[in-house]
Image (spheres, grey):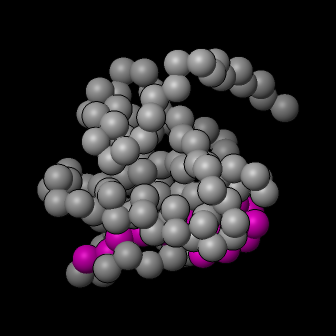
Amino acid sequence: MIRDFTIQDHEEAFALWKSSEHIGLSSADDWVKIKKLLERNPGMSKVAVENGQIIGTILCGHDGRRGYLYHLYVEPHYRRQGLGKKLVEACLEALHQQGINKCHLFIFGGNEAGKQFWHNTGWQKRDDIVVFSHDT
């Protein structure tokens, strides 16, 4: 079952993210910051649940023009069953309902399985953009 991510899911989701070598965590992923993301973007982020346990997550938000996806994670046992695609589709539908028609995501360059997933689900890799970051 896919449902909205709530702040009560943070602890369990954070533990899943920590178990993945392909999800980069920072202070932006603490309880307070995730609560702000969820409040600013209600109904956008999702979790997949089976037998009362979170088995998949995706964070989603927008800036009024573009959507952004973060922390797509599916427990290894549940991969290759379409769950990741369903989580993404739920977020894209939520963005579409808000009038957001383009979405971006960031992925580590060495995450070959992740790059293959995004390619296989119709996303286009952009080689014309370089990302700069700055801590405030």
Residue at the (72%, 24%) spot, across then down = 133
Q: Position of residue 75 (x, y in %)?
A: 25, 55
Q: Where are the magenta residues, as a range?
A: 34-50
Q: Is residue 101 above or below residue 10?
A: above
Residue 22 % position (x, y): 38, 35
* Residue 45, x across and y down, in percent: 55, 65
* Along the line of sight, the residue nearer the viewer: 76 or 131: 131
Q: Residue at x 28, y 42 (%)?
A: 120
Q: Residue furthest right?
A: 136
Residue depicted at 28% across the width and 34% down the height = 116
Kindly tell me whether residue 124 is visible in this rendering: yes
* Direction from residue 21 to residue 125 in the image, left or right: right
**Residue 21 visible in this rendered orientation of the protein:** no
Asked if 113 appears above or below 121 in the picture, the reply is above
Q: Nearer the viewer, residue 36 or 121?
A: 121
Q: Is residue 106 magenta?
A: no
Tell me if residue 136 comes above or below residue 35 in the rendering: above
Indicate the quadrant where residue 44 lies: bottom right
- Residue 127 location (% of width, % of height): 52, 18
Q: Quadrant of the C terminus?
A: top right
The tally of labels here is 0
Residue nearest the observer in this picture, 70 or 67:
67
- The N terminus, quarter of image: bottom left
- Verify whether residue 45 appears in magenta: yes
**Front residue of 57 and 122:** 122
| Residue in the picture at 61% in, 50% down | 102
- Horizontal placement of 86 versus 126: left or right? left
Q: Is residue 43 above or below residue 100?
A: below
